[in-house]
Amino acid sequence: MKYVCEVCKERIEPDGRGKVRVEGVTHSSAPKAWVWGPVPCHRDCRPDLRTPYDDQVGFGEYQLTWQDMTA
């Protein structure tokens, strides 16, 4: 499967464990419940990731979350 970074639109290759980093927004009280995403994202691109929840992240209800998922 082909993975493309949500930010830079460049291809992401799975790491040595066959995993790809994904980012998204989750509920602070339920960090495994994705509200937005997950989308593939390079580690270096993470600061430039934009979501529909940016104005609400960090104020209690939502948080940015990353995870390494099997490709």
Image (cartoon, rainbow, N blue to C red):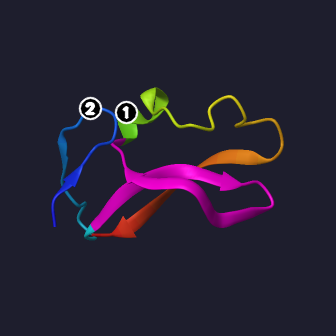
Residue 6 lies, in percent from the top left, at 33, 41
Per the image, label 1 sits on a secondary structure element best described as helix
Residue 69 lies, in percent from the top left, at 39, 67
Q: In the image shown, does 53 or 70 lie closer to the viewer?
A: 53
Seen in the picture, residue 52 relative to 16 is either above or below; the reply is: above
Specify whether 44 is left or right of 54: left
Q: Are marks 2 and 1 in contact (CB under 8 Å)?
A: yes
Quadrant position of residue 21: bottom left
Q: Which residue is painted at 68% across and 46% down in the image?
A: 63
Looking at the rendered image, the disc whose residue lies closer to the viewer, 2 or 1, is: 2
Q: Which residue is painted at 81% across and 35% down in the image?
A: 59
Quadrant containing the C terminus is bottom left
- In the rendered image, residue 40 lying in the magenta stretch gets the answer yes
Q: In the image shown, does 53 or 43 lie closer to the viewer?
A: 53
Seen in the picture, residue 4 relative to 69 is either above or below; the reply is: above
Residue of label 1:
45
Instruction: From the image, give the main secondary structure of the stretch colored magenta.
Output: strand
Quadrant position of residue 13: bottom left
Q: In the image shown, does 33 or 12 lie closer to the viewer?
A: 33
Inter-mark Cα distance, 2 to 1: 7 Å
Residue of label 2:
8
Seen in the picture, residue 36 relative to 69 is either above or below; the reply is: above
Residue 14 numbered tag: none
What amino acid type should be assigned to the residue bearing mark 2? Cys
Q: Which residues are magenta?
A: 19-42
